[in-house]
Image: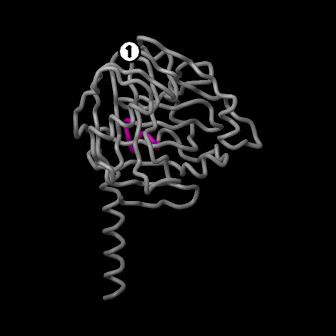
Amino acid sequence: MKRTFGILFTLFVVLAALYVRADSTAPVVFQVSSLAAFKQGEYDGGTTFAELKSHGDFGIGTVNGLDGEMIALNGQFFQIKSDGTVHAIADSEKTPYAMVTFFKVDRDLRLPPQTRGFAQLQETLDRLIREVNSILAVKISGEFAYLKVRSVPRQQKPYASLEEVLKNQTVFELRNIRGSMVGFRFPSYMDGVNAPAYHFHFITEDRKTGGHVLDCTIEGLPVEIAVKSRLELILPSVLINVTP
């Protein structure tokens, strides 16, 4: 009897996990590795982009070897290299660090005129959203007055820490340009798993350039918010589910 119950319970857990994975409306963020490991120089991962696509159509991250910035928008995955050029990512490529979700809008907002600076953008979003304990997926689209973005070159082994790598980042300034900012905000209690702040990547509407957002000036653009209550975190040898 106990053996039968154990088998049935295991089967239930497996089926429930498969259901969540297959359900594109589930409020789940799928993340490869942790920020703490990534910052220490863990730049080689085993998760392919084919696998990543099965978990989301919206997200950010990088490519193995820390080869530039990655952005996923409307199911398309792009790599922004250190020269600022954009390339489609093959399914066979792998990522050491990424977060994706199926983007389903829960809330529509609009930024006030003249949101100047990344710090002001974060403060404004927090004031408008008022959701401190959930993970937020955030998309801002339209014509941006000003953006400062960066990318980084592919790294060679032995890998340096992220702090060292960013000393050689390439920075681009973009003005009066149409595109989308794609990103997440994780709650403060998840520090180390991810950054307890807003993290955005940008890609132009014509898919010609972009990068990790460092600074911005935004004039009253619309904001779409997806509220996420679950995190599926994959590490080299273990799969962990964390519910905020």
Q: Residue at x 35, y 15 (%)?
A: 143
Where is residue 188 shown, x and y percent of the image?
A: 43, 52
Q: In the figure, 97 relative to 108: above or below?
A: below
Q: Quadrant of residue 64?
A: top right
Where is residue 112 shown, x and y percent of the image?
A: 28, 25
Where is residue 86 shown, x and y percent of the image?
A: 52, 20
Q: Residue at x 56, y 41 (%)?
A: 95
Q: Residues within 10 Å of mark 1 (few under 14, many from 20)?
A: some
Q: Quadrant of the C terminus?
A: bottom left
Per the image, is 54 magenta?
yes
Outermost residue toward the right in this view: 158
Q: Quadrant of residue 80?
A: top right
Per the image, is 140 magenta?
no
Q: Is residue 123 left or right of residue 86?
A: left
Q: In the figure, 113 relative to 106: above or below?
A: above
Outermost residue toward the top in this view: 176
Q: Quadrant of the N terminus?
A: bottom left
Q: Nearer the viewer, residue 80 or 199?
A: 199
Q: Residue at x 43, y 39 (%)?
A: 198
Q: Which residues are magenta?
A: 51-58
Q: Which residue is mark 1?
A: 178
